[in-house]
Image (spheres, rainbow, N blue to C red):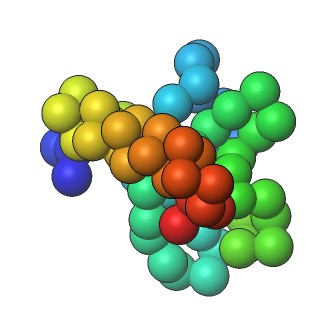
């Protein structure tokens, strides 16, 4: 993933997109930030910190997300 610094989870990103996030459960995964906030919602835990993805990695996540939307499947 990105070599950038982690940003505190209480500070939201300045744009919608996909980010590497760490939850209070200790799990780290790629998560979408949208107008609704962090997706998936808080049932996964709370975002402790996040960081930018490399542009190519984020683009791949966008394409995967759009594929699942077109196929009528949930985002996983």
Q: Residue at x 59, y 25 (%)?
A: 16
Residue 65 visible? The answer is no
The part of the image, by quadrant, that contains residue 2 is top left
**Residue 52, percent across and down?**
36, 36
Q: Residue furthest top?
A: 14
**Residue 68, percent across and down?**
51, 53
Q: Residue at x 23, y 28 (%)?
A: 55
Viewer-proximal residue, 42 or 76? 76
Q: Residue at x 70, y 46 (%)?
A: 38
**Residue 10, percent across and down?**
71, 42
Please give left or right for residue 33 compared with residue 51 in the image. Answer: right
Compared with residue 15, is residue 5 higher up or lower down, i.e. above or below? below
The part of the image, by quadrant, that contains residue 44 is bottom right
Q: How many marks?
A: 0
Compared with residue 24, is residue 46 higher up or lower down, i.e. above or below? above
**Residue 31, percent across and down?**
53, 52
The part of the image, by quadrant, that contains residue 57 is top left
Please give left or right for residue 39 compared with residue 53 in the image. Answer: right
Residue 73 visible? The answer is yes
Viewer-proximal residue, 58 or 4? 58
Q: Residue at x 27, y 41 (%)?
A: 60
Compared with residue 42, is residue 32 higher up or lower down, i.e. above or below? above
């Amino acid at each position: 993933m990105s070599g950038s610094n982690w940003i505190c989870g209480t500070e939201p990103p300045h744009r919608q997109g996909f980010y590497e996030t760490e939850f209070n459960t200790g799990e780290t995964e790629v998560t979408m930030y949208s107008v609704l906030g962090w997706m998936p919602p808080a049932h996964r835990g709370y975002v402790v910190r996040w960081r930018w993805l490399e542009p190519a990695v984020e683009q791949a996540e966008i394409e995967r997300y759009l594929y699942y939307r077109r196929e009528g499947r949930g985002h996983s």
